[in-house]
Amino acid sequence: MSEFRFRLIVCGPTSHEISDEELLDASDALGAAGCDDCSISVHEQGLELEFDRESESLQQAIASAIRDVEQAQFAVESIQLDRDAVLAAASSS
């Protein structure tokens, strides 16, 4: 298995709208749904979840992360990939 780095932007409160307590609640819900391999920050469109997920392929890593995020009752707005991170992961396999 390889580790893949990518970000999911999820609909939610933006930096102007979220309290520390709401951010902690979101973190708890995401962790309980299996997203313990991501860091959470606030994005202008909602929450940004940066994953370092192990999987057989990038597609499987993203699909499983989306499934976990949706289980936590969040909707994925977009997927962001860093070209360098994808190339580094591909060259290490």
Image: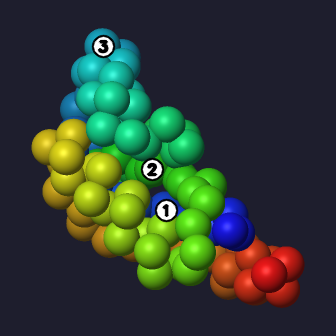
Compare marks 1 and 2 and give the one earlier in the sequence.
1
Q: Is residue 72 left or right of residue 63?
A: left
Q: Is residue 72 above or below residue 87?
A: above
Q: Is residue 24 above or below residue 79?
A: above
Q: Which residue is mark 1?
A: 7
Residue 4 picture location, percent across and down: 63, 67
Compare marks 3 and 1 and give the one earlier in the sequence.
1
Q: Is residue 71 left or right of residue 20?
A: left
Q: Nearer the viewer, mark 2 or mark 3?
A: 2
Residues under labels 3 and 1: Cα distance?
A: 22 Å
Residue in the image at 49% along x and 68% along y: 61
Q: Is residue 30 above or below residue 48?
A: above
The three-letter amino acid code for the residue at tag 2 is Leu
Residues under labels 2 and 3: Cα distance?
A: 17 Å
Q: Quadrant of the N terminus?
A: bottom right
Q: Which residue is mark 2?
A: 49
